Image (tube, rainbow, N blue to C red):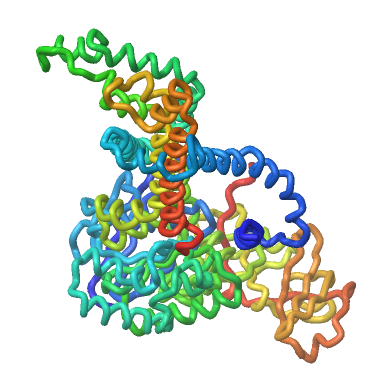
Amino acid sequence: MALWATAGATGNGKRDGSLGYLVPALLLVVIFFIIPVLMLLLRSVLEPEPGLQNYATLLGSTTYLRIFLNTFIVAAVVTILSVSIGYPVAWLLAIMPEKWSRLVLAIIILSMWTNLLARTYAWMVLLQRTGVINKTLMGLGLIDAPLPLVNNLVGVTIGMTYIMLPFVILPLMGVIRAIDPGILRAAALCGAGRLQCFLRVLLPLSLPGVAAGALMVFVMSLGYFVTPALLGGTSNMMLAELVAQFVQSLVNWGMGGAAALVLLVVTLALYAVQLRYFNPNAAR
Amino acid sequence: MSEPFLNIRGIRKTFGSFTAVRDVTMDIAQGEFMTFLGPSGSGKSTTLYILAGFQDPSGGDIFLDGRSLLATPSHRRNIGMVFQRYTLFPHLTVGENVAFPLRIRRRPQAEIAERVRAALKLVRLEGFEDRKPANMSGGQQQRVALARALVYNPPVLLMDEPLSALDKKLREEIQFEIRRIHQETGVTILYVTHDQEEALRLSDRIAVFSQGEIDQIGTGPELYAAPATRFVAEFIGDSNFIETSIVSTDGRQARLVLPGGAMIDGVPLHGAASPGGRAALLLRPERIDLQRGEGEGALAGEVYDVTFLGNNVHVLVGMNDVAPVSVRIPFGHAALAGLTPGERVSLRFNAADTHAFLEPPAA
């Protein structure tokens, strides 16, 4: 019943009989999403025997808590870096002449379409002890010994920030482009210099885009597997790696399910916060 | 009028090989309501944008109270502006929008509250402080924009076609409000519009723009009674133009031959002309005396069409070799009762009511 009510409340006014058309889509969601999640939930409380001992182990061990902490720190740092790098890029893209912004956008999107593994291996080559970055820094005399840039959380953060950037830039660019330049002119004549214009007008108006991009990046980062697995070290695991280890190496579906569900609950909580505070439709 | 207050001196603006504004010069007195009137692309908005500091002129200078404005960026010019589109800050309430210029100027909280209240009272929107712009009508939004532009008491208020997005009835209502606000505040207003009625209703003086230049500056009656160019004559009021040739001229007045062969003497002539040249004769539709039958009028023709327009009647008179002339006569004019298409009529007019504009030689 809750589902029907939600559909009715957020639908765009066309309610009469249109719910019938939603049945195939709802079936798809139930079969491929809700049922597997419920099965996972069940296995996490039933295996190896009924009870909450999987969750107790997970949340009671410093090793596992360390992994949760790693995951949140990396996701948070990646989010902050993506937004700080992505915001100016999105702004430039929004105000650039059309032909230049198209070119830059094409490069960004092309990189998104390039195989994820290829891009991650490329970072591995760049970041390794004898890679271009360390060689350049040493050649310039800035460092004496190679920096440990890979097989640790630094590498993971760099690689993931790179992969997440388009997910911040694209929505933000749309939001910034939608801001009427006339509003910024009005702000200027009201006495606002560049900084005031940015802080009092442009930033608040683009905040829904920042929130959307940041949430997307944070949530994706929390569950990201490939980049941490390739660029990370064995000592500093992230949550997705832990789930993979439980399921693939240890065949412990109970623990794997519990770890996955903790991740899901956190994600949903964050989504609820975003809906509550940054939903542009609710704000106006 | 007091001392020259705002002086625009030879402003030019070129974009590549295109000249948008050429040599615009005018003096505006403190408290004056000056309108830039012209069709789109005539340079009136560009001139306003140069005043606002959104564009730099290619030449010329602007002085406010004797000091050049050009080196001052927009946000330090202390000028108010209302735009064509709605430019309220959508994330702020009405009260916060109006307070914005004062917050930027770091005024004390109590003063901000007091002045926001006064500004909203001025535009008759008291009690709307907590509304968001999105929940207001277009007319209300423009009134908030006006309050925001006036709340810091700028010496000059620029208005760039602020009513063009509104429907006719609302437009007239807000025109009235703008006049009242101008009288109450005494602020100097530069107003851009392409609507001659709006210009006539609001302005102390009107600058008519055409192709990047000012054709004439004057009060509404001046522009109507003594247009300097054919363009001004066409833009202010309704007009007929009849092609004539010049018989003789003393430089200010001319003796012309009308298409039917009749002569007319003492027509005010604009432009240096010589006998034999061609001139377009301006006849205002409401300054033509229409007589039934072939009288001794200067022009004779046949009624094509009679249209009742409420307080007056519009008669279209066709003539040989001349574009039809429109004549406006008061409704109830006894001698013309029952005028029907096909009737022969003659037209008379005073030379002093007409103007002749030099035509370029036929190509």
Residue visible at 74% across and 80% down in the picture: B309
On the rendered image, what quadrant is the N terminus of chain B found in?
A: bottom left
Where is residue B313 drawn, in percent x and y? 75, 80
* Residue B207 in view (yes/no): no
Q: Nearer the viewer, residue B361 or B187?
A: B187
Q: Nearer the viewer, residue A139 or A29?
A: A29
Where is residue B292 drawn, in percent x and y? 82, 81
Q: Is residue A202 above or below residue B281?
A: above
* Residue A101 in view (yes/no): yes
Residue visible at 19% across and 63% down in the picture: B66
Residue A151 picture quarter: top left
On the rendered image, what quadrant is the C terminus of chain B found in?
A: top right
Where is residue B52 drawn, in percent x and y? 33, 57
Residue visible at 46% across and 48% down in the picture: A268
Residue visible at 50% across and 77% down in the picture: B174
Q: Is residue B9 above or below residue A89?
A: below
